[in-house]
Amino acid sequence: MNSTGFAIRTRHFGDVMDFYAPGLKEWSTPEWKPVNPKRFLPVSVTGSACALSCDHCQTKVLSGMAGIPTGESLFDVAARMKAGGSEGILVSGGSTRTGGVPLTPHLADVPRIREELGMKVIVHSGVVSPKLAERLAAAGVDGVMLDIIGSDDTIRDVYHLDLTTADFARSLAVLADNGLRIIPHIVLGLHYGTFRGEYRALEMVTEYPVSTLILVVLVPLVGTPMAHLPPPATEDVTAFFATAREAAPAIPVNLGCARPMGSVKVDLDQAAVDLGLNGIAYPADGVIGYAESRGITTNRYEYCCSLTWAGDAENAYAEVRVS
C-alpha cells in the first residue's frame, strides 16, 4: 500500500473521510441506510433527450432524472421536490451539438429556488461559454459540475463533438473568472475502457481554483456501444487515485457515484481510503468500517459528494485544511 496519499489527506484534512448517499438512486448497505433518500435529487432540463448520444451513455443516465413537465418551470419541479423532503437539486440534462447543457432558459428560477425554498442548486453544465458563465454567476448557483476530457480523440470518438481539450480548459477558465465554485469530474477509462487523456485532464484541473475534484470510473452500460467492454483495469484506476491525491494535496478529491460493482467496487473503495481520497459516494458494504479500522473518523451525508462545503462538512474542512 502506498502510504503517501494517506499522509497527505491527514496533513491537509485530518483523520477524516466523508461518505455520501444522494438520492440519485435507491441505495443502502448494512452499514448505512439513508434516513431521507430524497434529500438531494437530479432534474434533467431536456428530459431524456440528448443531441450527442455519447458512446458511454446513450442517454441512459438521463432516464433516472426527473423532467420538467410541459407547462411547468424548474421552480415548480423544485417546489414539489422540496415538499417531498428534498434540500437540494442537481440541474442537468442532455447536451446540445456544441457540448453544453441548455441551462439558460431555466436560470431565472435559480434565485427563487435558493431564496424561497432554501434549496441548494448545483448545475451540470457541459462546455461553458463566457456568456453562460456570467449567467450562472448572476443566478447564484451553488456550484458547477463539468466533465474534463484530456484527449481530443476521446472528445471526437466518444462524445461526438467537434471540439478540443482547449475548449474544456477555457470552460474552467471562464468559470474561475466569474468566481464560480468549480466541481470538475474526470471519467477514468472513458476511451473505451482505456486510459488516454485522464492525466492531461488532471493537469488542466489543477491549473484552476477548483472546489472539489470528483473521480468516476467508466461502467460499460447495457445498450451502449461500450456494453461489451471490460471496465478499466483496477490497477490503472488506483494508480490515478494516487497521482490525483499528490497533484491536488489541498483540494478535496472524492470517488463519485459511477464505478463498477461487485468485488471491483470493494477494491476501488478500499484503495480510495488507503490512497488518501477525501470521500466516497455510495460506499461498498464494509468500507466505512474499513476506514474506521484505520483510525479514520467517518461522516455520512445524504447529498451529492460535490457539496464538500455544505453543512457540517464546511466547518470540518475549515478546521483542518492547511494552505
Image (spheres, helix red, strand yellow):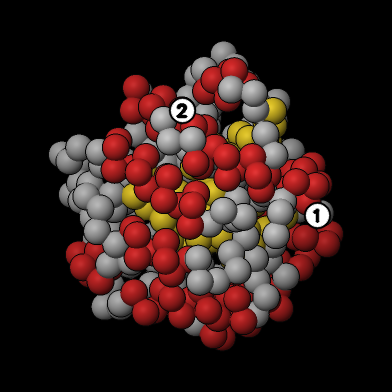
Name the amino acid type tagged 1.
Leu
Please report the residue visible at 56 percent of the width from the left and 60 percent of the height from the top: 183
Query: What residue is pinned by disc 1?
Result: 117
**Image vertical order of residue 141 relative to residue 14, above or below:** below
Name the amino acid type tagged 2.
Gln
Residue 175 pos. (x, y %): 58, 75
- Which badge, 2 or 1, is on the more N-terminal residue? 1
Local SS, label 1: loop
- Using the rendered view, name the quadrant where residue 158 is placed: bottom left
Which residue ends up furthest to the left in the rendered image?
A: 228
Please report the residue visible at 64 percent of the width from the left and 23 percent of the height from the top: 295
Mark 1 nearby-residue class (10 Å; few <14, some 14–19, many ≥20): some
Left or right: where 269 falls relative to 76: left
Please report the residue visible at 35 percent of the width from the left and 23 percent of the height from the top: 262
Mark 2–mark 1 distance (CA, rounded to whole Å):
38 Å
Residue 290 pos. (x, y %): 54, 20
**Image vertical order of residue 1 relative to residue 165, above or below:** above
Residue 248 pos. (x, y %): 53, 57
Query: What residue is pinned by disc 2?
Result: 270
Residue 218 pos. (x, y %): 32, 45
